[in-house]
Image (cartoon, helix red, strand yellow):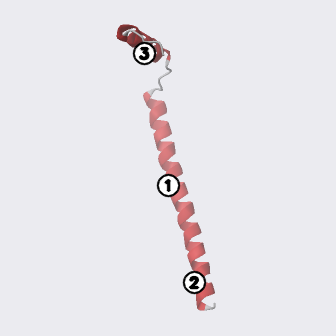
Amino acid sequence: MATINPVQFMQQVRAEVAKVAWPSRREVMLTTVMVFIMAALTATFFSLVDYVIRLGLTMIVTGF
């Protein structure tokens, strides 16, 4: 592997970071809210599925 000068490395890192398209504060807040909403919906869905499975197994075990 080729060795690289630490100064050159830092220059390349700065050049690459300058190319990054950073999101605005509004975009970050919007995606954060969307993640929380999706997490809540997913938790609700799996809670309902768990309840239905538990209810079904209870009915099977107790013989209806």
Q: Which residue is mark 3?
A: 13
The residue at which mark 2 appears reads as 58
Q: Position of residue 17 (x, y in %)?
A: 45, 17
**Label pair 2/3, CB-CB below 8 angstroms:** no
N-terminal of the two: label 1 or label 2?
1
How many tags in the picture? 3
SS under mark 2: helix
Whole-number angstrom distance, CA of label 2 to CA of label 3: 60 Å
Mark in the foreground, 2 or 3: 3
Mark 1 or 2: in front is 2
> Which residue is at 36% across, 11% downward?
6
Q: Nearer the N terminus, badge 2 or badge 3? A: 3
For the residues labelled 1 and 2, the Cα–Cα distance comes to 27 Å
Residue 21 or residue 3, whichever sits in front: 3
Amino acid, disc 2:
Thr
At label 2, counting other C-alpha atoms closer than 10 Å, the crowd grade (few under 14, some 14-19, many 20 or more) is few
**Mark 3 surroundings within 10 Å by alpha-carbon count, few (fewer than 14), some (14 through 19), many (20 or more):** few
